[in-house]
Amino acid sequence: MFIAHIPMDYLFDAPIQTEFDRASFYYKSCSSTNDMAQRYMFHSAEGTIFITEHQYKGRGQRGSSWASEAGKNLLFSFILYPEWLAIDAVFALNIITSLAIYKVLVAYLPKALAIKWPNDIYCLDQKLGGILIETNIGDKIKAAVVGIGLNVNQLHFESSKCTSLAIQKGTIFDSALLLNQIMDGLSSYYAQLQNGNHNLLWEKYSNILYRKIGWHAFETIYGSFEGHIVAVNRRGELVVAARNGNHYSYKPKEIVFV
């Protein structure tokens, strides 16, 4: 299938530049950028980016919806073909994506930014963005679509639990610049992962986790308890230390931040 480059001058003033060899697709509006990327899976180069101003069926982790004011935020997805990555290490894609976003945004929010496991970007106790990774897995990880939504220039939200860069810094941000910087970081971390630097990447990720410091309330099917986050293991499970001294591991649907 021939893949044409779709100009994005309407949305961005600067061209998108990364080390990935890929095309880029721009949509004024679409169901979701992950949906668009899924259409071109296996027919586009690794790193191909799909960008929109507005998505009317944006979704998050575990079937949640993602609402965003049109033209105000950064909504994009890209395709990866990490066939070399072990299936049980698929959470590594979440880790390198989180690190790439964190590396860019921490320059603006040095004391407030954290990664809320498994897929959210937080500024203090408010959500700044999210990640949704959808994979095609058989006997190996054949492909992955990585979707990112960042609240950039939106000033009003229905929920007080959400915020944006513009709210936090009192200025308008260049979305194209942020996108370029994130993809540059992603390209670097992806290469590190491919080169086997798993331990370093996991350590960096664990050090920037939300609620890493201090005791906090969590809830499971067995009830509520206080604990602090220790790390994320190689299976992508959250490791939490309880006050009784024991460490417990949880999959995404098994624990809730209270």
Image (cartoon, helix red, strand yellow):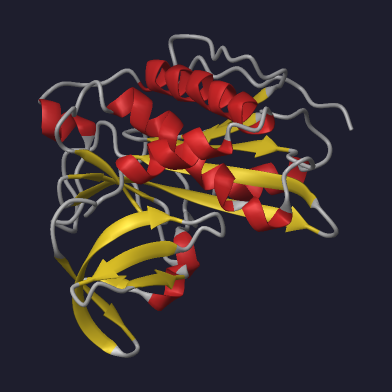
> Residue 47 or 7: which is nearer the viewer?
47
Q: Is residue 188 left or right of residue 85?
A: left
Residue ranking furthest to the right? 1
Picture quarter with the C terminus = bottom left
Q: Is residue 19 above or below residue 191?
A: above
> Residue 36 or 89: which is nearer the viewer?
89
| Quadrant position of residue 223 | bottom left
Q: Position of residue 30 (x, y in %)?
A: 55, 45
Q: Residue at x 34, y 35 (%)?
A: 73
> Residue 40 or 256: which is nearer the viewer?
256
Q: Is residue 51 above or below residue 239?
A: above
- Residue 25: in sight, yes or no? no
Q: Position of residue 209 (x, y in %)?
A: 30, 47
Q: Is residue 202 left or right of residue 178?
A: right
Q: Residue at x 47, y 42 (%)?
A: 202
Q: Is residue 91 left or right of residue 244?
A: right
Residue ranking furthest to the top? 14
Q: Position of residue 222 (x, y in %)?
A: 32, 90
Q: Position of residue 127 (x, y in %)?
A: 25, 50
- Residue 211: in sight, yes or no? yes
Residue ranking furthest to the front? 245
Q: Residue at x 79, y 42 (%)?
A: 83
Residue ranking furthest to the bottom? 222
